[in-house]
């Protein structure tokens, strides 16, 4: 199906009536066809491709599974590591408010203010994947092995994440090497909660989800509201994902419309004044790496050059679902794509979503 309508205002007060999602009589037929092709290419049980172009949304859904009881575009999907963009924006907001500088040593925040070494791991190191931490704690695999195909992270609670960080001794000086780390972003979440004296669910809800009007975004599953994930075969269902002690690294689940609202705020930061400074900040390059420094990162996004300007994106996956988020300020376009199957090799999902946004 296709729905095209003007985007809702993200900063509505709690008692305001949200705008109705009214279909436009003349949808962009070319975009409609391209989204349909993308859904077919992904070939997953449940798939949604949602595009916002200058505030006008077009959504195409489909899948190999029978239609669920509720429209696919109204279900919440696990977005995995794409949720790190929320964590990066949260850190940017706390810095913009003057509550943090980003240079605070994470160890001091998590270890009762005890003195740190001369080159500590800072909050900025954690969000930019330059902390020197591995992708996951060294003892994670042994604990997660019995549930590796279902909920491996659920077996590793927050206290253990913090303890593993406090025991870790980086081999390289923080800030000198980029290495993608779920461990590092999970530690950042616990450090931000400690710095503000606010539990992570309350912190991200109060500072981000509320101001942005993301009422259909949550950290935990809720029966009847969430899409079902599947393994590679597209038939075997997997349990709802439990991020355990890694909520800042990948616990969020959201509807495609909430994801578009999130992306539209990045395209037009002025639409959400409380977050405007942070939304501008996470579009600024903070790190370049690789041959010729071709790989550019912000505090929340991968950033690729296009002819008219940069493309920002991040993907994510859980054991049974996948997500891709991206936006292009030069074309006023945002894309949120989700699907209910996890590939592990020769994955068409991310490539299809990225190419769709790059060609807009």
Image (cartoon, grey):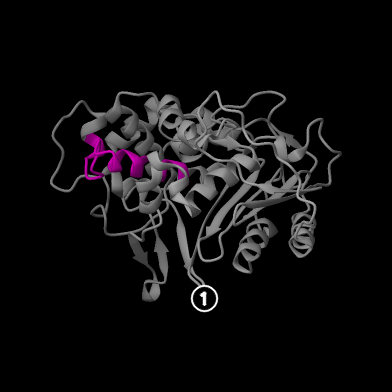
Q: Is residue 41 left or right of residue 313?
A: right
Rendering coords of residue 242 (x, y %): 56, 30
According to the picture, the residue beneath numbered tag 1 turns out to be 307
Rendering coords of residue 176 (x, y %): 27, 59
Vertically, is 125 above or below 109?
below
Q: Is residue 231 left or right of residue 96?
A: right
Structural crowding at the residue carrying mark 1, measured as other residues with C-alpha within 10 Å and reported as few (<14), some (14–19) or many (≥20): few
Vertically, is 39 above or below 199?
below
Rendering coords of residue 89 (x, y %): 40, 44
- Tell me the chief SS of the magenta region: helix
Residue at position x 49%, y 47% in the image? 265
- Which is more toward the observer, 272 or 38? 272
Residue at position x 46%, y 40% in the image? 249
- Which is more toward the observer, 166 or 197? 197
- Which is more toward the observer, 147 or 175? 175
- Hey, which residue is sitting farthest right in the picture? 66
Vertically, is 186 above or below 220?
below
Rendering coords of residue 121 (x, y %): 25, 45
Regarding residue 263, the answer to whether it shows in the image is: yes
What SS does tag 1 mark? loop
* Viewport quadrant of the C terminus: bottom right
Q: Quadrant of residue 30?
A: bottom right
Residue at position x 72%, y 40% in the image? 73
Q: Is residue 290 magenta?
A: no
Regarding residue 137, the answer to whether it shows in the image is: no
Vertically, is 176 above or below 342?
below
Residue at position x 13%, y 34% in the image? 115
Q: Is residue 91 magenta?
A: yes
Magenta extent:
85-107
Give the tally of numbered discs. 1
Q: Quadrant of residue 45?
A: top right
């Amino acid at each position: 199906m296709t729905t095209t309508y003007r985007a809702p205002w993200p900063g509505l007060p709690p008692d305001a009536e949200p705008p109705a999602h009214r279909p436009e009589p003349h949808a962009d037929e070319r975009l409609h066809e391209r989204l349909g092709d993308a859904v077919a290419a992904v070939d997953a049980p449940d798939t949604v491709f949602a595009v916002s172009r200058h505030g006008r949304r077009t959504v195409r859904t489909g899948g190999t599974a029978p239609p669920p009881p509720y429209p696919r575009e109204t279900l919440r999907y696990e977005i995995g590591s794409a949720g790190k963009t929320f964590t990066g924006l949260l850190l940017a907001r706390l810095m913009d408010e003057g509550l943090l500088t980003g240079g605070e040593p994470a160890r001091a925040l998590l270890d009762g203010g005890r003195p740190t070494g001369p080159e500590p791991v800072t909050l900025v190191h954690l969000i930019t994947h330059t902390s020197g931490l591995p992708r996951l704690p060294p003892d994670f695999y042994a604990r997660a092995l019995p549930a590796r195909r279902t909920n491996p992270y659920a077996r590793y609670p927050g206290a253990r994440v913090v303890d593993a960080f406090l025991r870790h001794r980086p081999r390289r000086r923080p800030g000198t090497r980029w290495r993608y780390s779920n461990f590092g972003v999970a530690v950042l979440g616990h450090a931000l909660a400690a710095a503000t004296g606010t539990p992570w669910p309350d912190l991200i809800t109060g500072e981000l989800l509320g101001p942005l009007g993301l009422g259909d975004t949550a950290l935990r599953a809720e029966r009847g509201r969430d899409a079902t994930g599947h393994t590679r075969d597209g038939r075997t269902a997997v349990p709802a994902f439990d991020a355990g002690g890694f909520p800042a690294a990948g616990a969020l689940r959201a509807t495609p419309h909430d994801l578009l609202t999130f992306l539209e705020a990045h395209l037009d930061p002025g639409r959400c004044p409380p977050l405007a400074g942070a939304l501008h900040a996470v579009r600024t390059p903070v790190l370049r790496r690789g041959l010729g420094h071709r790989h550019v990162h912000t505090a929340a996004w991968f950033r690729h050059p296009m002819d008219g300007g940069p493309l920002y994106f991040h993907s994510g996956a859980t054991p049974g679902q996948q997500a891709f988020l991206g936006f292009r300020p030069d074309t006023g376009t945002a894309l949120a794509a989700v699907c209910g199957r996890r590939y592990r090799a020769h994955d068409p999902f991310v490539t299809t979503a990225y190419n769709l946004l790059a060609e807009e």
